Image (spheres, rainbow, N blue to C red):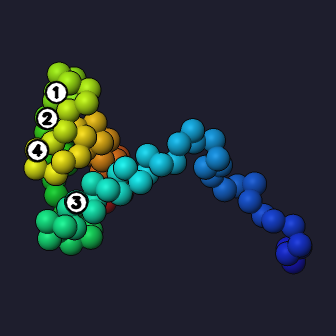
Amino acid sequence: MRDLTIKQDSEKRKLEYLPDIGILADIAQVFEAGAEKGYKRDSWQDVEPERYKAAFLRHLIEWWADEDSVDEETGLEHFQLMLCNAYMLWWLRKNASG
């Protein structure tokens, strides 16, 4: 039997090593913008990865031209949108069936 007086967290991710977890809030803001447009919470998971790759590259090009550039449609920074596209691609890659 485990000793419940000792916290068993040695195998857990050490999120305190992340220099800024606020970046997760920036990604969440992109998902919130999608929800405001009427997209369902998990509908992004049904989109083919090629569309996220293309969006990633479009936002990269805009950011590369101007690091402070903002997307006209959402009002969010292109870098923030690029980061979210990378997140979605990573999630789809890790959770691909087959």
Extreme residue in the left direction: 73
> In the rendered structure, which disc, 4 or 3, sits on the residue that comes first in sequence?
3
Query: Alpha-carbon distance for marks 4 and 1?
Result: 15 Å
Residue holding disc 3 = 33
Residue holding disc 1 = 61
Compared with residue 62, is residue 55 higher up or lower down, i.e. above or below? Answer: below
Query: Alpha-carbon distance for marks 1 and 2?
Result: 5 Å
Say whether residue 81 is left or right of residue 10. Answer: left
> In the rendered structure, which disc, 2 or 4, sits on the residue that comes first in sequence?
2
Tell me, for residue 72, which label it has, or none.
Answer: 4
Tell me what residue is drawn at x 18 percent, y 48 percent: 75
Inspect this view and state whether residue 83 appears.
yes
Helix, strand or loop at label 2? It is helix
x%, y% of residue 96?
31, 56
Residue holding disc 2 = 58
Query: Alpha-carbon distance for marks 1 and 3?
Result: 21 Å
Quarter assignment of residue 79? top left
Discs 1, 3 touching: Cβ within 8 Å: no
Say whether residue 40 is left or right of residue 4. Answer: left
Q: Amino acid at mark 2?
A: Arg
Q: Nearer the viewer, mark 1 or mark 3?
A: 3
For disc 2, the neighbor class at 10 Å (few under 14, some 14 to 19, many from 20) is some
Tell me what residue is drawn at x 81 percent, y 65 percent: 7
Q: Amino acid at mark 1?
A: Ile
> In the rendered structure, which disc, 2 or 3, sits on the residue that comes first in sequence?
3
Q: Amino acid at mark 4?
A: Glu
Discs 1, 2 touching: Cβ within 8 Å: yes
Tell me what residue is drawn at x 22 percent, y 60 percent: 33
